[in-house]
Image: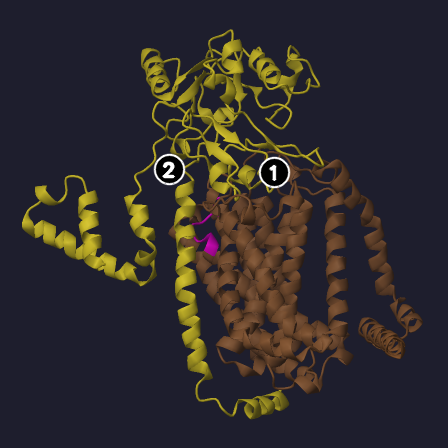
Chain colours: A brown, B yellow
Amino acid sequence: MDNGIQYTAQSSASSAEFRNWFMDKLFMGMSVSEYARSLATPFNLAAVAILVASAPVFIMRYTRGLASVMDATSEYPWGLLLSWGIFAGEPLFAAGFVVAAAYYLFGMKSYRPLVRLAVLGGMLGYAFAASYLLIDLGRPWRIYYPMLVNLGPSSVLFIVAWHVALYCTVQLLEFSPAILEWLGSRRLHRWAVSTTVALIIGGVILSTVHQSALGAMYLLTPGKLHPLWYSSHLPLLFFSSAVYAAMSFAILLAFVAVRYFRDKCDAKFISSTPSLTLSLGKGAALSMYVYFALKVLALAQDDRWGLLTTPYGYWYLVELLGFVAMPMVLFTAGVKSQSLKLIRFSALFALFGILLNRVNVNLIAFNWHLPGHLHRIIPPGTEIMMIMAMVTLHILVFRWILNRFPVTRELPEYEGTH
Amino acid sequence: MIKIKIKKNRSEDPGGGAAQDAAGRSARLSRRSFLSISMLAGCTALGLPARAGAAPEFEGWPKSYGMLTDFTACVGCRSCERACNEVNRMPAPEKPFDDASVFNERRWPNAKALTVVNRYENPGDPSRPVYRKIQCNHCLEPACATACPIHAYTKTPEGPVIYNEKLCFGCRYCVIGCPFNIPGYDYESALQPKIMKCILCYGRIKKGQLPGCAEACPAGALTFGKRADLLKLARKRIAEHPDKYVSHIYGEHEVGGTSWLYISGVPFEQLGFPTNLPKKPLIELTKGYLSTVPVIFTTFPAIFGLIYAATRKGDPTEPERQHKEGNNG
């Protein structure tokens, strides 16, 4: 009898303890009212406004079909949503594998403070890329079909599907030490850390294949994609541009962290950011030279020089000179003059170039010879709304994680364990 | 391994070997064995190049059916559209099938109409416009089937390319891949969207009936039959009336050949046909890439494992050094 009472008291005490611990983790040590007050900022207001305004669009998409929110047809099955969410987004999210490979595999130990942030950027990006797919797929509840129901191994998209799924898992595992530290689970943490190198190598493989496969998808469309953009080198071009996109994204992630999350960064992170930005800028410049050379090589190999003097040729030159060569030169100048500002600007510039390239391949240069082409690829407002909502959600989730998990700081009790 | 490969290659080579003199053969062998050695690293173990070399080129199912459209005979009555609508139990169209005003716009097959007829100007004789019936061409090696990550498309031995909506998750990569922009997706359905396209009345031809459009055509513009016979017929018509036809059977070679063939009095380019397509099936363009994927999986762990081992060695003072770097930055 006595024992029973004691046991109940004890369990209620520990459940209250758990509740306190849980709320503490969730509200970052603030009380509920303090936390609620801290949320009333102009940024949050704008975010809520965008999400509320876009809610009806999402409801329409799932109750009245894709036609209610997109202008998709037999000639233009994919719109800006996929261009933005998958084709332009995923090169950026290669940041996880590029930085992790530099630190874990190539022995560039100075990258240590940045690894987790880059892996978080990659992991979250891939999760969101999958979410864009859940909007765009006709029957999103069948998203696992290529994995479990029926296999179509002759398809490049089959490769993409498998690699995104596996890479999402690998990135979650790569990031798991941070989650486990947040939760304070030492034993699982030790186990998670021990698998790191194998995971990183797996991640490099999956990401290499996946990034190149996005380009390889368009190998199937020689009659539809403009010959200046169509090349047998598409897989290589998509992969090599993902490398500099990843470095540019990592530069900007580090900048956002030290600028807007300074109280969540430890001294090591803040003090190493300038040198890492410089180092990443160097890498990005170098990989842009490689990419630029490959682009010219593709042009030469298919002997497309004559097309450069057509309207699409001018547009091609805008992309190649204005959005590849230009940021490439700026990166170089930034590294030479050790200007962090210029390097960060070049990184943003380079990412616009990535977006432009992918939109060109997906939309502007695709089915370019059809009558009324340029009028038919203008995305409707509803599609833009969905993109804005997804970007807002992406930022909110990123902020939520960065505020809580030990990403840009090392917990003293875990120092030197990973 | 190398020896086996040489032997295999020789036996595949028709007329090679015996017909050649000894010197020529040995030169051939040494080149082959060199190739084999260079490919041994990751590829031969997986049998990839060997398979690519061994697989005979697919030239379509023998005795498969097809259709021949003769644009010089088509009068634009749209009987084929009506028949297609009826046999496939499609919803009634916005404008009736005898309304010629539809020719003022450029229409395209979609989830509501699996075939449409468009009108094109005839530069040779402006009083007689050309009517073009558009529908799935039933490629011998369909790009839609190549594109589908769930294998929802099948090229049947009878000829039609059919689709299984029970498997489809709606990515529409088949629409991207199709060189003719044919598969129509039912974008207006929220719960059961699916691809809608001509299936050459697969059910009807299995029963020995004609496809709906061919049965309905009053002008003799559509001929259903064995593809091989249709090619002979098309050649005969072109040969007998060289002044009436352009000398090209569209679909004979485009993207490896299609089951649906066309002959015309005006160049196909003027009728909106893509004339920039390769002669080989589109799957040939992705095969090379797909075969490198397993190679990456076999070689990367070794390469990166080695790099890891190499950079890790001799670095016992790592934490201290890293501290210094951090302070310097």
**Callout 1 secondary element:** loop
Task: Point out residue B217 in the picture as x, y percentages from the top left corner.
Answer: 51, 10
Q: Which mark is residue A76?
A: 1
**Callout 2 secondary element:** loop
Residue identified by numbered label 2: B280
State which region is magenta: A227-235
**Residues packed near mark 1 inside 10 Å, few (<14), some (14 to 19) or many (20 plus):** some
| Predominant secondary structure, magenta span | loop
Q: Quadrant of residue B30?
A: bottom left
Task: Point out residue B112 in the picture as x, y percentages from the top left corner.
Answer: 65, 25
Q: Quadrant of residue A178?
A: bottom right
In the image, is B14 to the left or to the right of B183?
A: left
Task: Point out residue A295 in the picture as x, y percentages from the top left corner.
Answer: 47, 57
| Residue A228 lies within the magenta run | yes
Q: Chain of mark 1?
A: A
Task: Point out residue B248 in the picture as x, y percentages from the top left corner.
Answer: 37, 23
